[in-house]
């Protein structure tokens, strides 16, 4: 049996207002830089999470191989952990060893789009 779905017009209107507000805020260059930097951090976090899952590692197993805590891995995958190049290399090494294939994380150009 199909669920009876109702569309809440108030929520839909708020969503379009959010997009309008975001577009207005993106006109501010400082906000725009921070916004796209956060988006890029989340894209990298997502890539790391997908690679970990492809390697069939839990966060706890992954953390053990990285010699860190599961909460650190969770912060990485949520985009809430600022990563150093050393940590990124360590992550790539662990995943490459597990998958027996090279791992690449792509970081693309300018913050401003």
Image (cartoon, rainbow, N blue to C red):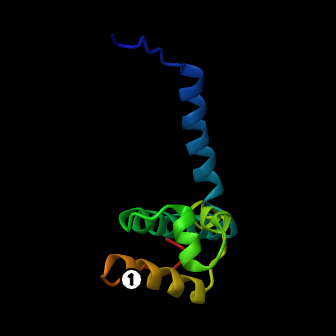
Q: Height in image: 70 above or below 105?
A: above
Report the front residue among 35 and 2: 2
Q: How many marks?
A: 1
Pick the quarter of the image with the N terminus.
top left
Which residue sits at x=46%, y=81%?
Answer: 94
Which residue sits at x=60%, y=67%?
Answer: 73
Question: Label 1 neighbourhood size at 10 Å, few (<14), some (14-19), many (20+)?
Answer: few
Which residue sits at x=62%, y=71%?
Answer: 33
| Residue 107 in view (yes/no) | no
Q: Height in image: 9 above or below 108?
A: above
Q: Residue 87's quadrant in the figure?
A: bottom right
Q: Position of residue 68 (x, y in %)?
A: 65, 75
Q: Residue 17's quadrant in the figure?
A: top right
Label 1 residue SS = helix
Q: Height in image: 108 above or below 15?
A: below
| Residue 1 in view (yes/no) | yes
Kindly identify which residue carries mark 1: 97
Q: Position of residue 15 (x, y in %)?
A: 56, 35
Report the front residue among 4 and 88: 88
Q: Position of residue 91 (x, y in %)?
A: 51, 80
């Amino acid at each position: 049996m199909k669920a009876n779905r109702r569309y809440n017009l108030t929520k839909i209107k708020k969503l379009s207002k959010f997009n309008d507000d975001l577009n207005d805020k993106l006109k501010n260059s400082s906000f725009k830089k921070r916004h796209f930097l956060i988006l890029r951090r989340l894209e990298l976090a997502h890539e790391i999470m997908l690679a970990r899952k492809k390697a069939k590692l839990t966060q706890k197993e992954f953390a053990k191989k990285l010699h860190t805590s599961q909460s650190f891995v969770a912060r990485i995958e949520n985009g809430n952990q600022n990563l150093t190049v050393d940590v990124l290399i360590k992550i790539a090494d662990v995943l490459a060893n597990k998958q027996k294939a090279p791992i690449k994380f792509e970081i693309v150009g300018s913050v401003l789009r």
